[in-house]
Image (cartoon, rainbow, N blue to C red):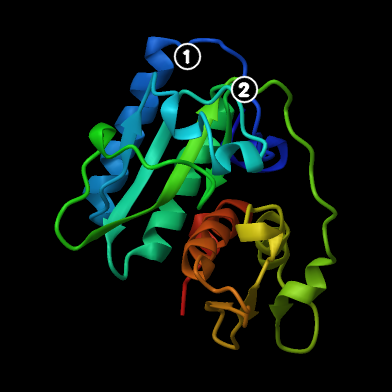
Amino acid sequence: MTLQEAIVARHSVRQYKNQAIEAEKVEQLHAAIEEANRKAGLHLQLVTDEPEAFAKGLAKYGKFSGINNYIALVCRKGMDEQLGYHGERIVLLAQTLGLNSCWVGLTFSKQPDHYTIGEGETLHGVIAFGYGATQGVGHPVKPVEKFYKAPAGDIPEWFRRGVEAAVLAPTAMNMQKFEFELLPDGRVAARTRFALVGTYLKIDLGIVKCHFELGAGMENVRWA
């Protein structure tokens, strides 16, 4: 499975099997996390065999179960978009490895003994992952025309593919508060739209930009 195929196959999964993840898959995820940290200056951390974060409290309200593995989403202030972008690349990698995942912002219990939060850093949430009890289900997809602006006339096929991939991206509460604009010089502007609850908008923007690049082909995309 390619990353582009993973975009279509991936759905958020909240219930997981009691099935260990093979060491070689854990190592691939760990390597991807280290690469993201090095490239973007993030502090993502892999936590395995740790059931307490989703054992009680808000996790039960969120209908999570069987979660023993997650990625702690730690970064400095102002790095939210990079966190979303690189976190989603790891989500899609996990999907290619036959694993399921779910971005989680609030409905888990913090376990500070299992990851490090440095000075000036914040834990923005976690990405749960493992072997899902199901493969999840997709949400209704809005028409792609609601998510972009472009000059009059035919839009390039690569741009439309990018928006189609972005519409399949996970966003907080499935709000999809984003839009893309194809500028006259061929560059692409990505923006958030107003939301009453905007805590995760910049993370969402990074996630959808990751999908857009993979759908459009990175060689076609010049960000404004």
Quick check: 185 above or below 157?
below
| Viewer-closest of 27 and 163 | 27
The residue positioned 45% from the left and 39% from the top of the image is 90
Image position of 85 with respect to 8: above or below = below
Between 186 and 41, the one nearer to me in the picture: 41
Q: Gap between marks 2 and 1, in whole Å?
A: 12 Å
Kindly check if marks 2 and 1 are in contact, taking CB atoms under 8 A apart as contact: no
Q: Is residue 63 above or below residue 193?
A: above
Residue situated in front as seen by the camera: 183 or 9 = 9
Residue at 38% x, 11% y: name it. Answer: 23
Residue 95 in picture, x, y percent from top left = 58, 30
* 102 over 55 or under it: above or below: below
Expressed as whole percent of the image width and height from the top left, the position of residue 63 reads: 67, 36
- Residue placed under numbered mark 2 in the picture: 16
Q: Earlier in the sequence, mark 2 or mark 1?
A: 2
Q: Residue at x 64, y 53 (%)?
A: 169
What residue did someone put label 1 on? Answer: 21
Task: Tell me where residue 28 sits by quadrant.
Answer: top left
Q: Residue furthest front?
A: 57
Q: Nearer the viewer, residue 163 or 82?
A: 82
Residue ID at (80%, 78%): 154
Q: Nearer the viewer, mark 2 or mark 1?
A: 2
Give the quadrant of the N terminus: top right
